[in-house]
Every structure is written in structure tokens, then in C-alpha cells.
């Protein structure tokens, strides 16, 4: 698992999304993990991204309570 900052190949640091593990967990549950690994997040349809975002929102709301 990646933590902290990494370089983007150009010597500049890129930010790591702290919600990335949650996104990966949900994408695995929806059967989309292999597609994400092969093509990145941009390879998903808007519908799939919305499903992941909706589930993330539900879980985060549940955690806050």
C-alpha cells in the first residue's frame, strides 16, 4: 500500500488520495477491481464511478455516526 508522497516521474510529488483503500475495496465488491488495475480509474463508466461514490458516501456517513 502506498503512503505519503510519491514522485510522478518528473521529480514532482503527487498527492495520495486517503480514500483510495476504500475505493479499491468497493470496486472489488462490485467486480470492477481488475478493470481499475488494468486501465485505471478513468477506464470506468460514469455509472460505475457514481455507484462507487454513492457507496463511499453511505459508508463515510455511517462511520461518522
Image (cartoon, rainbow, N blue to C red):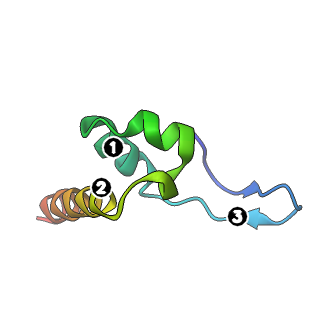
Circle 1 — which element? helix
Residue 48 shows which numbered tag? 2
Quarter of the view holding residue 57 = bottom left
Q: In this view, does 40 lie to the left or right of 11?
A: left
Q: Are marks 1 and 3 in contact (CB under 8 Å)?
A: no
Query: Which image quadrant is residue 27 in?
Result: top left
Give the mark, 2 or 1, whose residue is nearer the N terminus: 1
In which quadrant is the C terminus drawn?
A: bottom left
- Residue at 50%, 58% (x, y): give it: 42
Query: How far apart are the two marked residues, 3 and 2, measured between alpha carbons?
Result: 25 Å
Using a 10 Å C-alpha cutoff, classify the residue at mark 3 as few (fewer than 14 neighbours), some (14 to 19) or many (20 or more).
Answer: few
Q: In which quarter of the image is the N terminus?
A: top right
Q: Is residue 32 left or right of residue 43?
A: left
The Cα atoms of the two marked residues, 1 and 3, are separated by 23 Å
Q: SS for tag 2?
A: helix
Q: Tell us which disc is closer to us: 1 or 3.
A: 1
Question: CB under 8 Å between callouts 3 and 2?
Answer: no
- Tell me which residue sits at (35%, 49%) in the image: 22
Residue 58 appears at what percent x and percent y?
Answer: 15, 61
Q: Which of 53 and 17 is in front in this view?
A: 53
Distance from Cα at disc 2 to Cα at disc 1: 9 Å
- Residue 3 or residue 40, whichever sits in front: 40
Which disc number belongs to residue 19? none
Count all numbered tags in the image, as a single digit. 3
Label 1: which residue? 27
Q: Disc 3 or disc 2, which is closer to the eye?
A: 2
Amino acid at each position: 500500500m502506498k503512503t505519503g508522497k510519491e514522485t510522478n516521474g518528473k521529480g514532482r510529488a503527487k498527492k495520495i488520495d486517503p480514500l483510495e483503500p476504500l475505493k479499491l475495496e468497493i470496486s472489488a465488491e462490485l467486480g470492477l477491481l481488475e478493470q481499475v488495475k488494468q486501465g485505471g480509474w478513468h477506464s470506468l463508466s460514469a455509472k460505475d464511478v457514481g455507484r462507487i461514490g454513492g457507496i463511499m458516501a453511505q459508508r463515510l456517513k455511517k462511520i461518522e455516526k
